[in-house]
Image: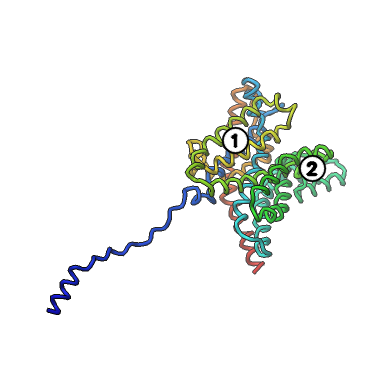
């Protein structure tokens, strides 16, 4: 009987459901990709090409006859590559805020940050000086110039002061002035980030207001235009604000945000192209860099969110790799142009000059990719490892 009761109890007992493994909540796609934004890396490649096109136009340059065959608006777009530098500065603030804005600062992190920033700038820059070293040697030891002027130029190039002193009469590597700005931004960044430590809409609004008003204040106080790092600080600050705004967007409502990426960068990019193409209607009100600052702000946020064919194209592996090599393209193209125009470019017709320009751009891309692979990246890695070992 006892056995029968036990059997009946077993039969009548509710069957326990099989154990279910706990399911982890699925994060929004943007949250997973928040620190991996390949479209912004790919964008750097096309910005660098735009700068190169700017340096191939102008009086006596190989691409100028070809550009003159286009309507003025198209010519403004091609010649306006110098405006890409402002986009680079906004992008620099955006990327640094993404890389260093998530953890508290301490002495060790500050040292690693400083070493990493030097490793980012100097290997490619020193390679650019090596490329033009024959002209540097000729100027220092053979040219009949004032010794004090020679010393000033060497201090300029040795300590990357071109952004503070303006042109001193040599053009060995004219884009290097922007490195003065970057180094200044690197010094300011930890302080700015500590102020942003407690991210609030009020603080973001104040920072955005400073980014808007700073150029106006500098102009009112007649700060020299040769002090370019001060005048471009607004771009860098706008990039930091853009990074925080992007974070707030993706944390608030992913289902809404993920649909606005294409519209954001598409609309802003179109407005920016119109500003550059028809710049005559803007110059009477704003300088072009200030007019394009909100455009850059929205383009970066839109591309970070992603969506659409342009963002997917910028995120492809070849374009992303070329974007990683964009610093080498930017800092090496003028030194390479010294050699190209003196020893390889001897053409006269528009077609031949255009072909020579295309060959030069292709050569710069190839040389820069090699420099990135075999000079910039290994040197960057070595300096970081050396700095870590010394710190230990």
Is 83 above or below relative to 64?
A: below
Observer-nearest of 162 and 311: 311
Asked where in the image residue 300 lies, by quadrant, the reply is: top right
Asked where in the image residue 70 lies, by quadrant, the reply is: top right
Observer-nearest of 360 and 273: 273
Image coordinates for residue 228, horizontal then vertical, percent: 76, 42
Q: Which residue is mark 1?
A: 361
Q: Secondary structure at mark 2?
A: loop
Q: Is residue 287 visible?
A: yes
Q: Secondary structure at mark 1?
A: helix
Q: Quadrant of the C terminus?
A: bottom right
Q: Residue furthest bottom?
A: 2
Residue under the point 67% across and 43% down: 238
Observer-nearest of 23 and 220: 23
Image coordinates for residue 96, horizontal then vertical, percent: 63, 51
Direction from residue 371 to residue 176 in the image, left or right:
right
- Residue 151 is labelled as none
Task: Answer few, some or many: residues within 10 Å of disc 1's Cα (few below 14, many 20 plus, some between 14 and 19).
Answer: some
Q: Quadrant of the N terminus?
A: bottom left
Residue under the point 58% across and 37% down: 46
Task: Answer few, some or many: residues within 10 Å of disc 2's Cα (few below 14, many 20 plus, some between 14 and 19).
Answer: some
Q: How is the image coloured?
A: rainbow
Image coordinates for residue 266, horizontal then vertical, percent: 55, 33
Residue under the point 87% across and 46% down: 148
Q: CA distance from mark 2 to mark 1?
A: 31 Å
Which callout, 2 or 1, points at the residue further toward the start of the chain?
2
Q: Which residue is mark 2?
A: 227
């Amino acid at each position: 009987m006892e056995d029968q009761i036990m059997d009946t109890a077993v039969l009548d007992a509710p069957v326990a459901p099989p154990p279910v493994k706990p399911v982890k909540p699925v994060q929004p796609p943007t949250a997973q990709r928040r620190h991996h934004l390949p479209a912004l890396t790919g964008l750097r490649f096309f910005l660098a090409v735009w700068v190169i096109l700017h340096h191939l136009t102008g009086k006596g340059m190989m691409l100028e006859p070809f550009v003159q065959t286009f309507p003025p608006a198209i010519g403004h777009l091609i010649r306006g590559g110098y405006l890409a530098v402002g986009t680079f500065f906004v992008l620099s603030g955006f990327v640094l805020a993404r890389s260093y804005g998530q953890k508290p600062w301490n002495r060790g992190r500050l040292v690693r940050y400083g070493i990493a920033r030097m490793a980012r700038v100097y290997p490619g820059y020193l390679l650019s000086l090596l490329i033009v070293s024959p002209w540097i040697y000729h100027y220092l030891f053979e040219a009949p110039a004032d010794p004090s002027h020679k010393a000033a130029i060497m201090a300029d190039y040795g300590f990357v002061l071109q952004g503070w002193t303006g042109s001193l009469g040599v053009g060995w590597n004219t884009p290097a002035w922007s490195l003065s700005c970057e180094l200044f931004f690197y010094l300011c960044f930890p302080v700015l980030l500590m102020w942003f430590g407690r991210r609030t809409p009020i603080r973001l609004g104040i920072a955005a207001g400073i980014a808007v008003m700073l150029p106006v204040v500098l102009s009112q106080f007649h700060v020299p235009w040769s002090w370019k790092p001060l005048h471009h600080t607004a771009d860098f600050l706008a990039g930091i604000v853009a990074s925080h705004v992007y974070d707030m967007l993706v944390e608030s409502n992913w289902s809404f945000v993920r649909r606005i990426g294409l519209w954001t960068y598409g609309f802003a990019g179109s407005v920016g192209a119109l500003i550059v193409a028809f710049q005559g209607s803007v110059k009477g009100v704003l300088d072009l860099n200030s007019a394009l600052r909100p455009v850059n702000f929205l383009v970066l946020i839109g591309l970070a969110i992603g969506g659409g064919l342009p963002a997917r194209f910028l995120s492809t592996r070849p374009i992303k790799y070329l974007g990683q090599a964009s610093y080498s393209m930017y800092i090496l193209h003028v030194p390479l142009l010294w050699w190209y125009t003196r020893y390889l470019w001897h053409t006269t017709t528009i077609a031949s000059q255009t072909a020579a320009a295309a060959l030069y751009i292709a050569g710069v891309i190839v040389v820069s990719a090699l420099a990135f692979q075999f000079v910039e990246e290994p040197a960057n890695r070595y300096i970081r490892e050396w700095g870590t070992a010394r710190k230990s």
